Amino acid sequence: MHQGWLTEDHRYFFQDDELDEAYGATARTRTLVWDLEDLDDPRLYLVYHARTDVYDHNQYVRGDRLYQANYRAGLRILDLGDLASKAVSEVGFFDTYPAADGPGFDGAWSVYPFFESGTILVSDMDAGLFVLEPTHAARLVARDSAVHEAPEVPGAFELAAAYPNPFNPATRLTLTLGTAQRVTLAVYDALGREVARLHDGPLAAGTHAFVFEAPAGLPSGSYVVRATGSEAASTRTITLLK
């Protein structure tokens, strides 16, 4: 066992091993959930497998959310609202290390989700400190246990600044949508020629992350990333330095 955290009622304990992915014990990032109703006889209640195969590191519970700092997968947010039915699902993420996936000791080291404002801090071994504000319609539980719904922003359509920028070979882009719609996200050179298409299709309301990895042979220089939705568009400039 490496680290773990209790639910606020102390009924369940979330455990990670950190290196079980390295030793072949699991093909994907694994979280063990223990039922502590009987402290003399705790039992394995649930095994959650993530979509990634990275090492897990530190995790914390606030309300009905589990916040995991999973090295190269960055911050992962899991919904525990239906834990009594053994249902756990990922509802948000922020990749602090877009340069690579897979097992490795890079990226998110720890996470602090306990501010009243809902702001989340993620410490990254390579990029430093990230200060994040969830933009998905997640329930944030304050210390008085009151439940607040995140406000909807129907007109929101924002392509956030890429990170890192300048970059080589990959950079991460985040698009926030107030409503579900069809979106095209593409990268263009200085002459307006498309060099990569990152997405072309429907997206749900919320925050979506994309990684642009420069194709082999793409020269250094500035490029424009353009997100085009049903009723709005947003652009950002990125710079490739080789």
Image (cartoon, rainbow, N blue to C red):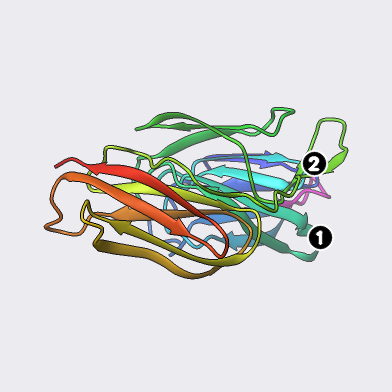
Viewer-nearest residue: 119 or 42? 119
168 lies left or right of 35: left
Q: Which mark is residue 10?
A: 2
Viewer-nearest residue: 11 or 52? 52
Residue 152 picture location, percent across and down: 74, 49
Residue at the location (18% across, 44% down)? 221
172 lies left or right of 69: left
**Magenta residues, start to end:** 34-42
Secondary structure of the magenta portion, mostly? loop
Q: Quadrant of residue 214?
A: bottom left
Viewer-nearest residue: 58 or 62? 62
Q: Amino acid at mark 1?
A: Ala
Residue 91 picture location, percent across and down: 63, 56
From this view, report whether residue 180 is shown above or below residue 157.
Answer: below
| Of the image marks 2 and 1, the number of the one nearer the N terminus | 2
Residue at the location (74% across, 64% down)? 86
Q: Quadrant of the C terminus?
A: top left
Q: How many marks?
A: 2
Q: Which element is circle 1 on?
A: helix
Most extreme residue toward the bottom is: 201
For disc 2, the neighbor class at 10 Å (few under 14, some 14 to 19, many from 20) is few
Residue 54 picture location, percent across and down: 42, 53
The residue that label 1 is drawn on is 84
User: Can you see residue 100?
Assistant: no
Viewer-nearest residue: 64 or 217? 217
Residue 154 picture location, percent across and down: 70, 53
